[in-house]
Image: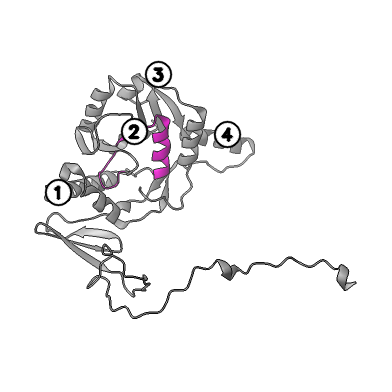
């Protein structure tokens, strides 16, 4: 009887896939004092758990900068700001500011002030998933957006109207309409009058309003306002009184200053416009619909 019983095949213990053990050794290095993360790693490597976040200090000419918890802060009186370390390290190394150490500091100060005013007026930045979906509609290489330090790094060129942060002022462009000033909108519209490779992301109009200039030569390919109406009609047929009032997922206010990647839900509905001669595939519209759907949660990293 025992000979005829089926036995389980030998199993591999989970511990077999664990990484190798680190050898214990004395390491007199103190992070931030006699060893820094941009230096060569000691032979054999080491792991050290810190009780507190490390504070890193750097100077740009006479301007003092400190970085803690991944957020660089400019301590210059009258020009103070805080942004994400990834944004600061990327911007300060752009060719347009080479040899002009104070230029990125001054620009970021202006941009943080501008962003604060926009957010106080109700504007919220679209999340990265939406920007990626907009980029894929026409393989866009450029974006017109609210600020240099919050611009997605997966675009080769970023600017506002006549102002260029990095890259070339040419190529298929995504425009975040509400993030631009009236002057910047006019500047872009002047350029767009002779090109067809643009995609505009804007708030849906509530009722009859003045026609925006890009609508004359454009076509509305997406609006989540239509999706909301469809949900409300379905609820009505089912006898439900629930209102489908959600609009889109957006970034939290001051997200760049706080390094906050959580996503909030806005009740503002949005639309996507392209030039009427641009052919958009169904799968591209579906990708945009999926990305724009209100969900909350967390945002991907801005890279």
Q: Give whichever of 180, 160 is nearer the camera.
A: 160
Counting residues from the N terminus, which is met first, the one under dot 1 or under dot 4? 1
Instruction: Residue at 30%, 29% (x, y): give it.
Output: 171
Q: What kind of element bears circle 2?
A: strand
Q: How many neighbours does mark 2 have within 10 angstroms: few (below 14), some (14-19), or many (20 or more)?
A: many
Q: Identify the colour scheme used.
A: one colour
Q: What kind of element bears circle 1?
A: helix
Q: How many neighbours does mark 3 have within 10 angstroms: few (below 14), some (14-19), or many (20 or more)?
A: few
The Cα–Cα distance between marks 1 and 3, rounded to whole angstroms, is: 41 Å
Q: Which label was assigned to residue 277?
A: 3
Q: Which label was assigned to residue 174?
A: 2
In the image, 74: left or right of 150?
A: left
Give the residues in magenta.
127-151
Q: Residue 83: where, in percent of width, then height?
A: 26, 54
Counting residues from the N terminus, which is met first, the one under dot 3 or under dot 2? 2
Most extreme residue toward the bottom, as rendered? 26
Quarter holding the N terminus is: bottom right
Instruction: Residue at 41%, 39% (x, y): give it.
Output: 132
Of badges 1 and 4, nearer the viewer stands 1
Q: Give whichever of 289, 122 is nearer the camera.
A: 289
In the image, 72: left or right of 223?
A: left
Counting residues from the N terminus, which is met first, the one under dot 2 or under dot 1? 1
The Cα–Cα distance between marks 4 and 2, rounded to whole angstroms, is: 32 Å
- The answer to the question of whether label 2 and label 1 lie on touching residues, with beta carbons closer than 8 A, is no
Q: Which residue is mark 4?
A: 233
Instruction: Residue at 48%, 70% (x, y): give it.
Output: 20
The Cα–Cα distance between marks 1 and 4, rounded to whole angstroms, is: 51 Å
Q: Which residue is mark 1?
A: 106
Q: Residue 117: where, in percent of width, then height?
A: 24, 46
Q: Residue 210: where, in percent of width, then height?
A: 32, 24
Of badges 4 and 2, nearer the viewer stands 2
Count of marks overlaid on the render: 4
């Amino acid at each position: 009887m025992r000979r005829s019983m089926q036995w389980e095949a030998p199993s591999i213990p989970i511990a077999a896939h664990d990484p190798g053990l680190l050898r214990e050794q004395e390491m007199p290095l103190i992070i931030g004092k006699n060893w820094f993360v941009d230096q060569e790693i000691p032979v054999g490597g080491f792991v050290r758990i810190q009780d507190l976040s490390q504070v890193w200090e750097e100077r740009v000419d006479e301007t003092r900068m400190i970085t803690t918890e991944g957020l660089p802060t400019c301590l210059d009186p009258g020009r103070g700001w805080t942004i994400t370390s990834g944004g600061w390290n990327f911007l300060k190394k752009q060719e347009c500011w080479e040899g002009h150490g104070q230029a990125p500091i001054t620009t970021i100060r202006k941009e943080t002030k501008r962003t604060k005013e926009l957010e106080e007026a109700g504007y919220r930045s679209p999340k990265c998933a939406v920007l990626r979906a907009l980029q894929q509609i026409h393989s866009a290489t450029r974006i017109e957006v609210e600020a240099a330090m919050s611009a997605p790094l997966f675009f080769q060129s970023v600017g506002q109207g006549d102002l260029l942060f990095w890259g070339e002022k040419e190529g298929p462009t995504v425009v975040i309409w509400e993030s631009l000033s009236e002057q910047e909108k006019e500047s872009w519209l002047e350029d767009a009058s002779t090109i067809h490779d643009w995609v505009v992301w804007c708030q849906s109009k509530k009722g009859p309003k003045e026609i925006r200039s890009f609508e004359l030569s454009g076509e509305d390919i997406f609006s989540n306002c239509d999706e909301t109406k469809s949900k409300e009609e379905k609820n009505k047929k089912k006898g439900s009184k629930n209102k489908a009032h959600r609009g889109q997922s957006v970034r939290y206010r001051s997200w760049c200053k706080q390094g906050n990647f959580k996503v909030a839900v806005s009740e503002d509905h949005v639309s996507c416009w392209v030039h009427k001669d641009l052919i958009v595939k169904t799968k591209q519209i579906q990708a945009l619909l999926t990305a724009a759907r209100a969900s909350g949660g967390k945002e991907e990293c801005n890279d």
